[in-house]
Image (cartoon, coloured by chain):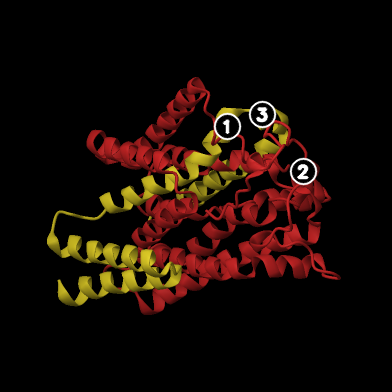
Amino acid sequence: MPNTGYILTAIFLAAGITFALRLIPFGIKSALKGNALVENLSQWVPMGAIICLGFYVLVSIDYSSADTAIPYLAGSVTTAGLHLWRGNLALSLVAGTAVCVILSNWVF
Amino acid sequence: MYQERTTTASLPFVTTSEVTSPATATGALPVISGEHVHTLPGESGFREGLRVAGFMCLGFVVMGMGLGVLVSSYGLAWWVAPVLSAVVFAGSVEFLLVGMIAAAAPLSLIASTTLIMNARHLVYGISYPLQNVRGGFAKALAVYMLCDEAYAVNTGPGSKNYRQGRILTVSILLWVSWWGGSTLGYFVGAAFLSNLAGVDFVMTGMFIILSIDAYRAVKDHVTASLAAAASITAIILYPQSMLLVALLALVCFLILRHLVQGRQGACKNSTQESQYA
């Protein structure tokens, strides 16, 4: 595990940036308000960024061996399928994780 | 993710450029249902906050538990879960932070990823009813806890009249749910799921779910396609720092989209949001 100082620095760095991003618009409200680029990006970036994250987690699966690739891919298919079907966050997450854990530990 | 959008632009006789004050925006709208329920007679701000945020808090406990389980699956110390969720309080980026911290990623990478992932907050302040929260500390707290869901619940037609009690109750309930969920998740993970391979799938699963929800909420295939293009470009060109490159490429693509739209004079999607400040 990385040392405590590094972890706390990372946490407070991320928190400081987040707080600044939340605070800044209150100061420059009028400048941002009429800006079409800012308003367009505010509509588009959130969904786009989450989709990039979706790709990122799928790319991050360890494909070097079937023992790791298959459980995570099976979990991904379970989660995506259940979520498209039922739309229940807890169900999709728990079922996908269960499939992945079971396959990782007792099948492969 | 749960941003409610109104279609002030499509109201008869009201063009978007004219809707500059909430009075004109809300005056023309019928009673709003769903997330933006108006105050009930005799209801305190606290109870109102409880009513509008209650269901979302359950979601936060579940997601928070996912974060806690992830922290334990990476073998990080127990205090990382409560400290991270209490201090950062910004949903999706915290899942990334767990992985980056466990891998001792450079602080520059942590800073740049946080900056891009959370840049969306830059526009929340334009319409969040902070003027109704009185006192420096309470205002600071409301800004600190301004996550996506707090924004979604506290902003909308009529938000000009939302009381301090409601705004702060929503923020604090969401924060407490997230913090409690992640702390509980760590101990559940450490007690029952340690030494099991595959538990870190919670992050994979979480982002698959969030992608599906985000697409369903907006159904904007242009942005979805550009995000896919940005991701695939990054995977091919820079597989080692795929996420950061993909996010940067996405922002570039979206700026291009904005320029192309502006040239065509067809800004049909723009200026519909943030009208009710």
Residue B204: image tag:
none
**Relative to B94, does residue B222 appear above or below in the rendering?**
above
Instruction: Give the residue displayed 41% in from the left and 51% down from the top.
Output: B96
**Which quarter of the image is occupied by the C terminus of chain B?**
top right
Residue A38: image tag:
1
Residue position for label 3? A34
Q: Chain of mark 3?
A: A
Numbered disc 1: secondary structure: helix
Instruction: Give the residue displayed 47% in from the left and 69% down from the top.
Output: B65
Instruction: Give the residue displayed 69% in from the left and 43% down from the top.
Output: B127
The image position of residue A79, as x and y in percent, is 33, 66
Looking at the image, residue B88 sits to the left or right of residue B253; the answer is right
Q: Residue furthest top?
A: B263
Chain in yellow, by letter, is A
Numbered disc 2: secondary structure: helix
Within 10 angstroms of label 1, few (less than 14), some, or many (20 or more) residues?
Answer: some
Within 10 angstroms of label 2, few (less than 14), some, or many (20 or more) residues?
Answer: some
